[in-house]
Image: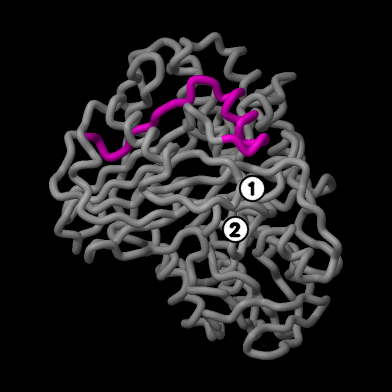
Amino acid sequence: MGELLVLGGGFAGLASALLAASRGHQVTLFEAETCGGKSAQIEVAGQRIDTGPAVWSFPAVWNEVFLQAGLSEWADVPHHKLDSLGTHHGKRVLDLLPTPADAGWQRYAERASRLTDTIEKLLYTPPRILNPEFQRLSARLFAELGHHLTARSYLQSLNLPPQLEESLAVYALNTGAAPEEASALHALVPYAMLQDLRVPVGGIHELVLRLRAACLHLGVKILEHTPILKVQKNRIDTTAGAFLGTVVSTLDFERLRVLMGEAVQKPARLSCSGVVLYAVLKEELDLPFHSVLLPESTTQLAQDMQNLRQSASPMVFVNHYRPHHIYPRNTLPVLTVGLTAPPDAQLYDLDHPWLKAQLNRVENVLQVSLQDKIQDVALLDPWQLSRWGAWGGAIYGKLNPWYRSGPFHFPGYRYRGIWLAGTGVHPGGGIPATLGGALILHQLMNHI
């Protein structure tokens, strides 16, 4: 078995390293900072806070990684079950999605339930036209979606109440694109997520730690604080020296191309970035665990992102963590406020006019006094996201057209002899897509 060099220590990199080691490869993983990627964990005023996703969906994909690695018993992670995607605030309040008594929700759920299993399996089925399983899953998908190719088109075909349509459509923004541009596949994701939605005890970073421990158990060598300087087929140069072997990159694709010595121009269209405030509070707020502020217009928001304008009405995710709940060791309440922002590599602080205006908006919509209860705070902004990732801090890198989203993404899983995975390669699905990408690599690389 040969040496494998895995670039990036996020979910995709750790899962790829684990699966390669389970096949008998000698694996070295390189991470510029500490393992976790976008799913890191910070400490503010002595309280632990995750910097990545807040929830864990499609846990069957996680289980499949450990099953394929021969470590099924490692997959069990203590967690809290969630039965809601939270309260959605638009022109009116849609309390605790789903709304089973709503006829529109029933119509949506009846249709979406036909494809939940299909969506999950597409996450880790190699997207090859001659693959019989991929053919079967794709046929089921297109039979249900028909000629409705975008998320907006599909949702409009269901004749849903406007607020419910917007609450479902906004999840297409997780691809970095407006629902008018994102694949119809993403309109089905909210229902599929709700079938088994979790938060690990201790936060999402516990999943990173479990993957890292499993990698070490199988003999993976992990070199943290080791940036990549140059990438070639079967060789990389790092701050720790040169290494030879088969390269698996989970870096942003455009970043990888720069490291390969290519002349790379800024993509014409980028996915969105974000500004996230992590606040330790003096006292708890009267809020549910998860709240969503909908943009007044997803179309206008997408245009603002492409024109590098700060939207007056971005999508906002608000998560409220009570002491000793998700984070058992935390003694103070924690609030995270995540705002859709343009990929402009800009620095933010609490005095930034746009951020202050958005915090005022959050207070007005949720009817809470927030800013006077902040004890300490940290910020994540496009500048930080751009340091090792995509242009301007674009979360999913280059924005693909709808027909290149999800399992149909470009460039696929190999480029000039380099194997590929990660959010910049298989965008729009967070943890499940990055883990699914690692599983696909595991299948495609079995011959080496």
Label 2 neighbourhood size at 10 Å, few (<14), some (14-19), many (20+)? Answer: many
N-terminal-most mark, 2 or 1 = 2
Amino acid type, callout 2: Ser
138 or 409: nearer the eye?
409
Q: Residue at x 76, y 35 (%)?
A: 403
For label 1, the SS is: loop
Residue 439, visible in the rendered structure? no
Mark 2 or 1, closer to the camera: 2
Label pair 2/1, CB-CB below 8 angstroms = no
62 or 187: nearer the eye?
187
Q: Residue at x 33, y 47 (%)?
A: 336
Question: Residue 329 at x, y = what percent?
Answer: 19, 63
Residue found at the very far bottom of the displayed protein = 241
Q: Is residue 358 left or right of residue 120?
A: left
Above or below, 179 against 44 in this view is above
Based on the picture, tell me whether residue 295 belongs to the magenta stretch.
Answer: yes
Give the magenta range.
287-309
**Label ID, residue 143:** none
Q: Residue at x 16, y 55 (%)?
A: 332
Q: How many marks?
A: 2
Residue 14, visible in the rendered structure? yes
Q: Quadrant of residue 74?
A: bottom left
Above or below, 247 against 364 in this view is below
Amino acid type, callout 1: Pro
Based on the picture, tell me whether residue 414 belongs to the magenta stretch.
Answer: no
Label 1 neighbourhood size at 10 Å, few (<14), some (14-19), many (20+)? Answer: many
**Label ID, residue 427:** 1
Q: Quadrant of residue 390?
A: bottom right
**Disc 2 target residue:** 386
